[in-house]
Image (cartoon, helix red, strand yellow):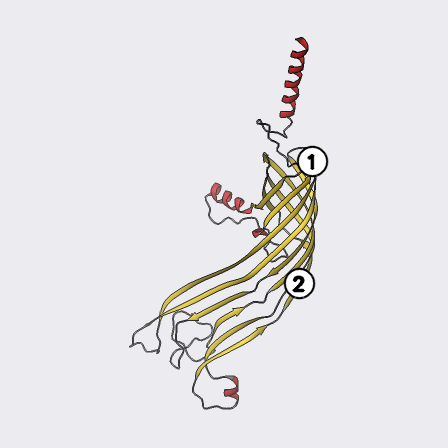
Amino acid sequence: MKKKVLFVASLFVATAIFAQDGLTSKKGEAYLPEAGDWSIGFNASALTYYAGNLFNGNVSNTALTSGSWMNGSVDQEIRFKMFKDEKTAYRLRARIGMSSSGGDLLGKYDQDANDSTEIQDYVVNTKNSNGFTVILGAGIEKRRGNTRIQGYYGGEIFFGLLGGTDTKTDDGRILSDDWFQPVGADPYDYAGTFSGNVRTTEVKTGSGFTLGLQGFIGVEWFFAPKVSLGAEYTWGLGMSSVGEGETTTEYWGLTDVEIATFSTAPNHVVTETNKTGKTGTFSFDTGHNAMLNLNFHF
């Protein structure tokens, strides 16, 4: 009987010591990830924006940024991890999407520049669309530490296809000899004079390509079982390129050819499309500005 009591007592003491080591909750749940665990994470910088507004009563606090040579896109990624063991994890980042938006601007204008006639209504409709965007990243992570504060480091490679943008503007004001749009004036409230009357109707940016290889280092605090808040820095190589775009404009008057040939043609709407050049960048720099991560393990 005495041996059984000692055995139960020793078992109780061992359990109590294990529960107090900081790596398990009162319910016996492990704080740290284990072999075979998965995790999903997202950028927690928005929490700093919310907290700043909450505690100082201001609505203009700026969230911590996480921009990089990858067109600032990392803050919109979904991040996954798969733990090979307690000290090693495989990482995957992914972003796939597209977007569009539109809006109307309502106003009045003097169509014939005559104060005695009725002011006309107009609508300027703008539509924006972003092409299909795919960004993928993969890497390996090594971890250190035996407490709920874990350090980690590793490397990743990124690949991305960034769709171009297309912005179309449909201006309801009718150009004529009596009304057109001079450069430098308020585009929503005037009857202009014939001087540089150019307005943009469409702007297209070229599609982009990006590739990068970077190392990272960070720290994670497991404040709840399998839930952590971490900060991460990266440093590496990045290269990107953006293809040719174009801008379409219209104005009231004559084309360059008509002017050069002293044409007697009447003024009319002239539409021109001009190409924009390609761009390319290469960088060796830090990739994130202390990016904050909130991770859930399961």
Q: Quadrant of the C terminus?
A: top right
The residue at which mark 1 appears reads as 145
Q: Residue at left 62%, top 37%? A: 221
Q: Quadrant of residue 142?
A: top right
Q: Secondary structure at mark 2?
A: strand
Residue 101: image location, x then y, percent? 46, 61
- Which structural element holds mark 1? loop
Q: Earlier in the sequence, mark 2 or mark 1?
A: 1
Q: Are marks 2 and 1 in contact (CB under 8 Å)?
A: no
Q: Amino acid at mark 1?
A: Gly
| Nearest the eye: 264 or 34 | 34
Q: Which residue is mark 2?
A: 281
User: Mark 2, residues whose alpha carbon is within 10 Å: few (<14), some, or many (≥20)?
Assistant: few
Report the residue at 60% width, 52% height from top: 94
Q: Is residue 214 left or right of residue 265?
A: right
Percent coordinates x, y for residue 166 in the rendering:
52, 66
The residue type indicated by label 2 comes to Thr
Q: Residues within 10 Å of mark 1 (few under 14, many from 20)?
A: few
Image height of 187 relative to 95, above or below: below
Q: Say which quarter of the image contains residue 19.
A: top right
